[in-house]
């Protein structure tokens, strides 16, 4: 049975798409072609994500990885897991040995980038960014990294949760990727 060896949980707007493009080029890594499977969300959250093609059964989830070469390590990228309170436990129930990877960004920059993305995709999104800067606002709360990551560390243990920073990716891609690939257990000199 082919299932992920690692899951990149986010956070959203922190460079996961760029990271995906780099990892897809590695000959020993197979990434799920569907970014955001929504599989490890609670049923209510998954139902809300059906319009984006949420994977709803374990059999359907397994199918996403069957094309992976036998020698490859397998990964999934789903940033929605990062902020979902039950995702860590759901992932652990199915994949107790999976490695969790989080890439983080300056919280203010992340919030603004998320806000801009929502402005672009929403038909009417006329809220001024200055009006949403409040500790209870969605855009701001996603930047409370400690509270989001603690769930994963408590469930998987610190050694199975790798935290990376997008600033490091920007300043030295080679060193950033070498660190990540070493953590994943694949050659960094390809």
Image (cartoon, helix red, strand yellow):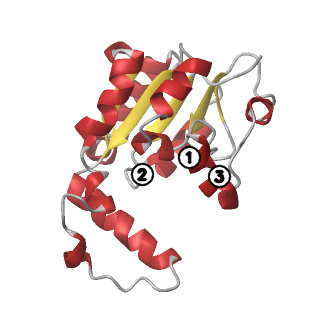
Give the spatial CA distance, label 3 vs label 1.
28 Å
Q: Position of residue 159 (x, y in %)?
A: 35, 14
Query: How many angstroms separate mark 3 from mark 2 (CA)?
Result: 20 Å
Picture coordinates of residue 114 (x, y %)? Answer: 37, 64
Left or right relative to 69: residue 49: left
- At numbered mark 1, what does the secondary structure look like: helix, strand or loop? helix
Identify the residue at image location x=24%, y=46%.
144
Residue drawn 42% across and 77% down?
119
- Of residues 75 and 89, the one nearer the viewer is 89
- Residue 46 in the figure: left or right of residue 89: right
Label 1, label 2: how far apart the Cα atoms are? 15 Å
Q: Report helix, strand or loop for mark 2.
A: loop
Which numbered tag is attached to residue 70?
none
Please give the residue where the numbered disc 1 appears in the rendered image: 21
The answer to which image quadrant residue 51 occupies is bottom right
Instruction: Tell whether 82 sits left or right of 127.
Output: right
- Residue placed at 32% from the left, 33% from the top? 149
Q: Is residue 131 above or below residue 184?
A: below
**Residue 47 - label:** 3
Residue 188 shows in the view: no
Vertically, is 147 above or below 73? below
SS for tag 3?
A: helix
* Disc 3 packing (10 Å; few <14; some 14–19; many ≥20): some
Mark sitting earlier along the chain (3/1): 1
Label drawn at residue 12: 2
């Amino acid at each position: 049975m082919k299932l992920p060896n690692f899951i990149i949980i986010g956070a959203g707007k922190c460079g996961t798409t760029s990271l995906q493009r780099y990892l897809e080029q590695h000959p020993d890594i197979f990434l799920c072609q569907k970014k955001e499977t929504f599989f490890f969300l609670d049923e209510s959250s998954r139902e809300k994500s059906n319009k984006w093609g949420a994977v709803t059964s374990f059999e359907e989830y397994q199918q996403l990885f069957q094309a992976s070469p036998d020698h490859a390590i397998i990964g999934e990228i789903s940033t929605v897991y990062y902020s979902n309170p039950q995702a860590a436990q759901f992932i652990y129930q199915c994949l107790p040995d999976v490695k969790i990877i989080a890439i983080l960004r300056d919280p203010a920059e992340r919030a603004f980038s998320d806000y801009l993305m929502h402005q672009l995709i929403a038909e009417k999104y006329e809220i001024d960014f200055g009006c949403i800067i409040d500790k209870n606002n969605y855009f701001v709360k996603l930047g409370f990294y400690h509270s989001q990551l603690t769930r994963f560390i408590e469930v998987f243990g610190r050694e199975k949760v790798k935290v990376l920073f997008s600033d490091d990716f920007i300043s030295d891609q080679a060193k950033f990727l070498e660190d990540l690939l070493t953590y994943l257990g694949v050659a960094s000199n390809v």
